[in-house]
Image (tube, rainbow, N blue to C red):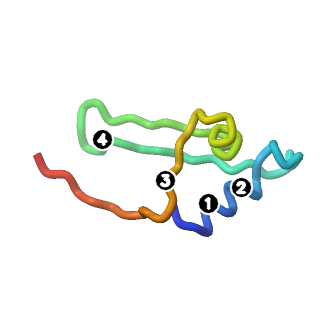
Amino acid sequence: MSKAQYRRMQENTTTMGNRDTIYVIFRVYNLGCENMGLRIYLDPEELRVSERLKFTAESWSVVPVYG
């Protein structure tokens, strides 16, 4: 998630009284595996505020894991 996406997430949340636009994160994982999965996080800013999602700032990186 980029800084701009993070800001957009914070701007489009129900906690700000905004009901017209809500940010959604779709997390797809284990692509190409039998246990491929999808998680949908509706209004992730509200989930962050209620401590049900944790975001780590300034460490945006993608690292492949080979095993």
Answer with the quarter of the image where residue 19 lies. top right
Quadrant for residue 52, please give it.
Answer: top right
Cα gap from disc 3 to disc 4, whole angstroms: 21 Å
What is the distance, in whole Å, between disc 1 and disc 4 at their CAs? 24 Å
| N-terminal-most mark, 1 or 4 | 1
The residue type indicated by label 1 comes to Tyr
Q: Secondary structure at mark 3?
A: loop
| Mark-to-mark CA distance, 2 and 4 | 28 Å
Residue 20, x across and y down, in percent: 85, 50
The local secondary structure at tag 4 comes to loop
Does label 2 or label 3 sit earlier along the sequence?
2
Q: CA distance from mark 3 to mark 1?
A: 11 Å
Residue indicated by mark 1: 6
Look at the numbered disc 2 and give the secondary structure of its residue: helix
The amino acid type, in three-letter code, at marker 2 is Gln
Residue in the foreground of this view, choosing between 45 and 22: 45
Report which residue position mark 2 lands on: 10
Neighbor class of circle 3 (other Cα within 10 Å; few <14, some 14-19, many 20+) is few
Q: Nearer the viewer, residue 15 or 43?
A: 15
Q: Which mark is residue 56?
A: 3
Name which of mark 2 and mark 4 comes first in the sequence: 2
